[in-house]
Image (cartoon, rainbow, N blue to C red):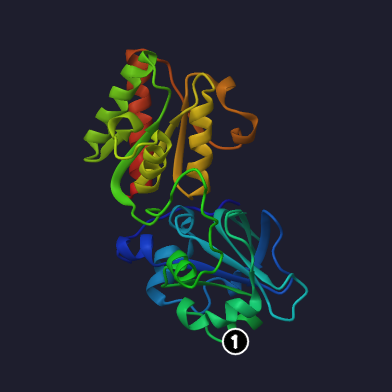
Amino acid sequence: MAIGQVRPAVVPQRRIQNQMYHFLVSYNGWSMSNDSINMSRAFEYTEDSLRQFYKPNGIFDIVQISKIPALFASETGGSGAQVAQVGYINHISRNGRNVDLRYTFDSSIPPIKNQQLEQLFPILGIESFELSRTHWAIKDVDLFRALYENQVGKIVSPKLFSIDNIHSIEDDLLSIMMPFSGDFKEVNITLQQMADSLDLRCLRADDIWENDAVIQDIVSLICRSKIVICDCTGRNPNVFYEIGIAHSLGKDVILITQSAQDIPFDLRHLRYLRYLNNNEGRKNLSEQLSKKVATIIDY
């Protein structure tokens, strides 16, 4: 039975977006994409306010849970690999006395050895005994900042462009990745108007000229954006390259297309919005995007 979704306003959104992460520990370690944990161990060592926010009325709120990162660790001395991996929880369902989880690991962050993780316990808000007990907690700590400042799981610097502004996210900024073609003029206008209706800014790479290299402008725009909207229509290689960059940087990416056949095989497991490039089709696209963007921005 799928677990429902409820969203009470208990914890300030600033905290939810910037200072939270899931800490999950298992004696047997974690599989690559799905596993389970006993219901009684869920949200142990978690503040009451956080427990109520993420599980209001005893119901897991997957919308909020999926917004913050997770650190999947193995018990020290357990049967699993003695490392922790960063990822995101994508789905939750009830299975008897257990909670079944589906998740993805962030391949850009290498596994963190237990010995190294233990040194970060004070910074990560983890009690010394927690790595010796299977459980799921939520911590009031900015996981990525803690790892970054302590040079744990450090991202390799690209040679072709800089990602120095990777943490300079502008919460009201959307970016559009689409072919620079007249065929997409009306689509671009539609997306701009959709953003205006939500009091957001929307930029395309050709709207800015801050660097000599075009690719640096594109990457900088992706780094700063809260959401990246990518139009796969026509299978444009530049757009696919930009999708890869956005996914690697952990951005919320919304795929749109005029044809399902233009979604490459490696991305077909992701949801996308299909539209017709006429007045009615663009109107429907705007309505669907408004709902999706509003959910992510958390109006």
Residue 174 position (above or below residue 105): above
Q: Position of residue 283 (x, y in %)?
A: 32, 21
User: In the image as oriented, which residue stretches furthest toward the bottom?
Assistant: 128
Number of numbered discs visible in the structure rendering: 1
Q: Position of residue 181 (x, y in %)?
A: 39, 17
Q: Dot 1 surroundings within 10 Å: few (below 14), some, or many (20 or more)?
A: few
Q: Give me the residue at 48% from left, 65% from top.
A: 58
Q: Quadrant of residue 86?
A: bottom right
User: In the image as oriented, which residue stretches furthest toward the front?
Assistant: 212
Q: Give me the residue at 38% from left, 31% from top.
A: 288
Residue 298 located left or right of residue 234: left
Q: Quadrant of residue 11?
A: bottom left
Residue 280 position (above or below residue 199): above
Q: Position of residue 148 (x, y in %)?
A: 47, 66
User: Observer-nearest residue: 73 or 150?
Assistant: 150
Q: Give me the residue at 65% from left, 76% from top.
A: 114
For the question of whether residue 133 can be seen, the reply is no
Q: Give me the residue at 56% from left, 37% from top.
A: 270
- Residue type at numbered disc 1: Phe
Kind of element beneath mark 1 = loop
- Residue at image mark 1: 129
Residue 215 position (above or below residue 70): above
